[in-house]
Image (cartoon, helix red, strand yellow):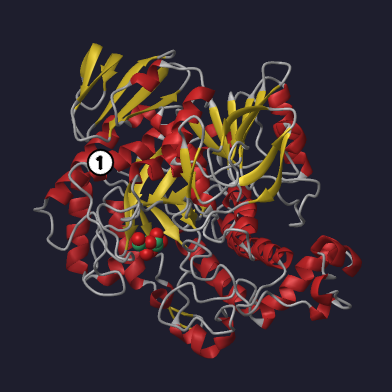
Amino acid sequence: MTWSHADNDWPTRGLSFGADYNPEQWDKEVWKDDVRLMTQAGVNLVSLGIFSWGLVEVADGEFDWEWMDEIVDLLADNGIAVDLATPTAAPPGWLLAAHPEVSPLDHDMRPRWPGSRLGWCPSNPVFRTYALRIARALAERYGHRDHVVMWHVSNELGGGNGRCYCDTSAAAFRTWLENKYGTLDALNKAWGTAFWGHTYRDFAYILPPRGNESKNPALVLDFDRFSSDELLAHYLAEREVLKSVTPDLPVTTNFMVGAEPDCVDYPRWARHMDIVANDHYTRSSDPLPEQDVAFSGDRMRAMTTERRPWMLLEHSTSAVSWQPRNRAKTAGELIRNSLSHVGHGSDGILFFQWRASASGAEQFHSAMVPHAGENTDLYRDVCTLGRHLQTLAPVMGSRAPQARVGILFDDEAGWAMTGGVKPNNHLSYGRIVRDWHAAFWRLNESIEVLPPWSDFTGYEVLVVPGLFLTDDETAARVKGFAEAGGTVVVSYLSGIVDEHDRVRLGGYPGAFRELLGAWCEEFRPLQEGETFTLDNGWTGAEWTELVHAEEAEVIARYVGGHLGGRPAITSRALEAGGRAVYVSAGLDSDAVLALARSLVRPTSMANLPNGVEVLVRRNDDETFTFFVNHSGNDAVVEAHGQEMLTDEPVSGDLHIPAGGVRVVRSGAVG
Ligand code: GLA
């Protein structure tokens, strides 16, 4: 079978299924076995060559393509499409030996020594020249092969070289600042450099935030922004080379979207991706890993244009190897996680990696073919998943309907909240956002996790959790949303500083004070182990505030303690039926759930059996409803249509086995 990507605007004909493929780690005999097993499992796409730079460019300008030619041919002969990676995540030894200055330096000016990966400074011109040369060479050699269907630029850009503090970076940072501010006066004013007498008299005196001591948070924030822009510039330079040779091949890079502020600003990068792609790994310590899958999917969907499908480029079949204790997935979890990603809008399910490595830094990471080989439950699950994905091919291209709940998430706000000294340095931005997401997720609400510049039209509830940095425009649009009849929930530590990281004066949260009709005079962070109780029985920890509710109704007050009788949660009614709720305290998750429940109109989805998640995708003619049973009990829900995985009609009761998934195909309205 030959495949040409011109047939379709998605790189594979069916839902993409496969993995990072690293044949360079194996003898050629194993390659034959690989394609046999891939074919058996239904693999139709592999990411090839990700770390292979030193294996094809064996010395400066000297190329050995033989092994890659062979594997590219073998994949073509077996009808397996290639997502070809530029290998720039792994600079070869000869390059690092000849140009040690390309290594990034950490905040204490220590180099990232060779022996790992992503050991390069994003601003280094020497590295850029070499990287673009290998990208061009690959594009010219393989880009016109029919089964090479997309480009995978480097790998997880920023995962290791997200911040470089070397002199080259410092010079590039100064240029970036001159472009942003124009004059030193403007920069000094924006950063408030008079504090500690730091007023700059020359751009040349500005350095990245080196060392461990407290720095001006505005400097730190601009360095975060600069670092994201530098890595994006690298991506764009590679992209331009690839497009100059193969204008029609989609180009992407794999994001690492999760719940904490990312190392780069993914929503601002997303518009430069032909396919928005993500790597997602759950953590052993996460009490709710299935909600983490949902959270990343709800973020990814908001990064594509008009909720188009995205692609999961990596996740794990079972345990990873980079956590302190690496949890193996339980029976059914591999398939359940994968189909949840599809339900959340991914049209591809790929893993790291195809075959578990015998050697090297990740030799104990799970893969589609484990160390024990094909006669394993894991490989059999992989084959079952492959069959499921083939069955689900009609889902391709369908999109999630407009969600009812929008939750704002912004990397810049997260960087601002966590950079520099803060009233409670133990708070996590991601935790605050995820608590709100978890509450609506438990209610089976449709959710999107949006960048603040998104269009808010169509949502019923807009949550603004910990949006520490809020610019005037965002504040005005949030206000406009509530004035037009929407429900806005603002949590503590939102709207505290402007885009220059300068505190908004006159009472917190300055950006939302007027909308909320309430304001905070003083933060009252709690000590470890300290808790509070409200007069409606809700409890919490970590954070309280001294709040004045002037034009808002008080929903709950503190009981006892130095804030006894004072407001903790307020609500202001607006004319068109809108309202603005202020949550000034660190509520426990049960209280967040109770509050979330009071903010949305009940739907039938909220009454589904415990642990059953519902996800909907639609196209013009059909609706695909995914029922994902995360619980250990069989469940029964009401559904009508054709169940796709069992190919049985459903009219009324649909049985979903414990830990299983069912997908019901029905007419457009669903
Ligand atoms: C990341 C990388 C992969 C691999 C996996 C392991 O996603 O891109 O190369 O290291 O993590 O989980």
Place of residue 455 in the rendered image (x, y in percent of width and height, measured from the top left): 66, 32
User: Quick check: 91 left or right of 264?
Assistant: left
Extreme-top residue of the structure: 651
Residue sitting nearer the eye, 462 or 62: 462
Extreme-bottom residue of the structure: 98
Tell me if residue 551 comes above or below residue 365 in the rendering.
above
For the question of whether residue 68 can be seen, the reply is: yes
The quadrant of the image that shows the N terminus is: top left
Residue sitting nearer the eye, 301 or 385: 301
Place of residue 23 in the rendered image (x, y in percent of width and height, measured from the top left): 28, 66
Q: Quadrant of residue 634?
A: top left
Circle 1 — which element? helix
Tell me if residue 598 comes above or below residue 520 in the rendering.
above
Q: Residue at x 59, y 70 (%)?
A: 163
Name the residue carrying label 1: 335
**Count of numbered circles on the image:** 1
Residue sitting nearer the eye, 670 or 606: 606
The quadrant of the image that shows the C terminus is: top left
Tell me if residue 44 comes above or below residue 568 in the rendering.
below
Residue sitting nearer the eye, 328 or 596: 596
